[in-house]
Amino acid sequence: MNRIRVSRRVEKKLAKGLVLLEASDLTDIDLTDQAVEVLSQEGKFLGTAYLSQQNKGIGWLVSKEKVSFDQAFFETLFRKAKEARKSYYQDDLTTAFRLFSQEGDDFGGLTIDLYGDYVVFSWYNSYVYQIRKLIIKAFKEVFPEVLGAYEKIRFKGLDYESAHVYGEKALDYFTVLENGVLYQVFMNDGLMTGIFLDQHEVRGSLVDGLAMGKSLLNMFSYTAAFSVAAAMGGASETTSVDLAKRSRELSEAHFLANGLSTDNHRFIVMDVFEYFKYAKRKGLAYDVIVLDPPSFARNKNKHFL
């Protein structure tokens, strides 16, 4: 394993618990896609990391101990993650949630989402993708109950089609439960799945009545998951806006799955920037507004970063 030395500034950053390494942290280091030991300028061991380009980051500090990224290491991480989600497993109203959440579970660059009996691995950089077989082998030891798995390669862009990894193949469309709400999902259709599980708690607050008796505007709505959660929580009306033509069909499917009438719930296929102008012209006002843009959303003339 190669060793890298970092400046006093970076040493202080790591001591604060910040684990994402950025280009400005390692200006004179050429290594990439490999595990490294991190040392101070004086040679003091600071931790084990790996280097790989991920958005604005170029690596992650993984542990302040000397560790090897082998099967045993990942099995330990997965057991800890599984134990931390015990409340989800015991919740009869939820069958879909994030099993593993990058640095929140002590390994940046990887998320694993559970959709009923199936999981989706998301690889966010080329190093994690490089060791994916080892990671999957460790996962299968800790989660033998999972029937099948898919993968999404997040660092290759939107043109990449997802792939089946192991086990049974899921139906093209099936429903999962989250906070007592049914959502229609799909495993093998590009980078999307029908619902973003990292927003579990936000949708939970809507189901619990955050928008009860109120009007809600959901921008970049995708499949209108926030809207259906709000409707289940008693929202008087919702408006879901997304540029993708397919969004209307997918959104209506969520409402239909929950037996909700769409009389007071609108689905608008429009560029959100244009809808802002439209709403201003018409004097439209909403009690609750949800803004959850994708990391990169654009039309021919505008983009949202």
Image: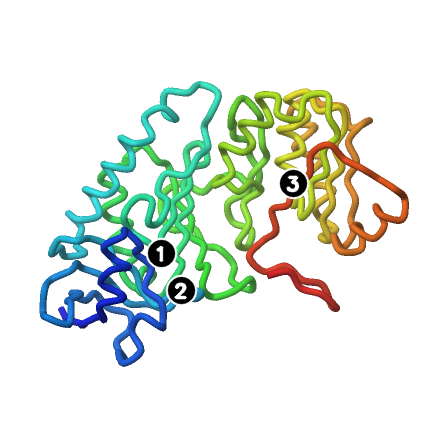
What residue do we see at 33% from left, 67% from top?
52
Give the residue furthest to the right: 282
Q: Quadrant of residue 140?
A: top left
Number of other residues with Cα within 10 Å of mark 3, as a class: few under 14, some 14 to 19, many 20 or more: some
On the image, numbered disc 2 is attached to which residue?
A: 54
Which of disc 3 and disc 2 is earlier in sequence?
Answer: 2
Q: Nearer the viewer, residue 265 or 22?
A: 22
Classify the position of the C terminus by image quarter: bottom right
Q: Is residue 170 left or right of residue 258?
A: left
What residue do we see at 38% from left, 51% from top?
165
43 in relation to 67, above or below: below
Q: Nearer the viewer, residue 13 or 192?
A: 13
Identify the element where label 1 is drawn. Answer: loop
Q: Amino acid at mark 3?
A: Val
Residue 256 x/y as whole percent:
70, 28
Residue 201 x/y as whole percent:
49, 32
133 in relation to 202, above or below: below
**How far, Cα to Cα, is label 1 from label 3?**
27 Å
On the image, numbered disc 3 is attached to which residue?
A: 290
On the image, numbered disc 1 is attached to which residue?
A: 109
**How far, Cα to Cα, is label 2 from label 3?**
27 Å
Q: Quadrant of residue 183?
A: top right
Q: Amino acid at mark 2?
A: Gln
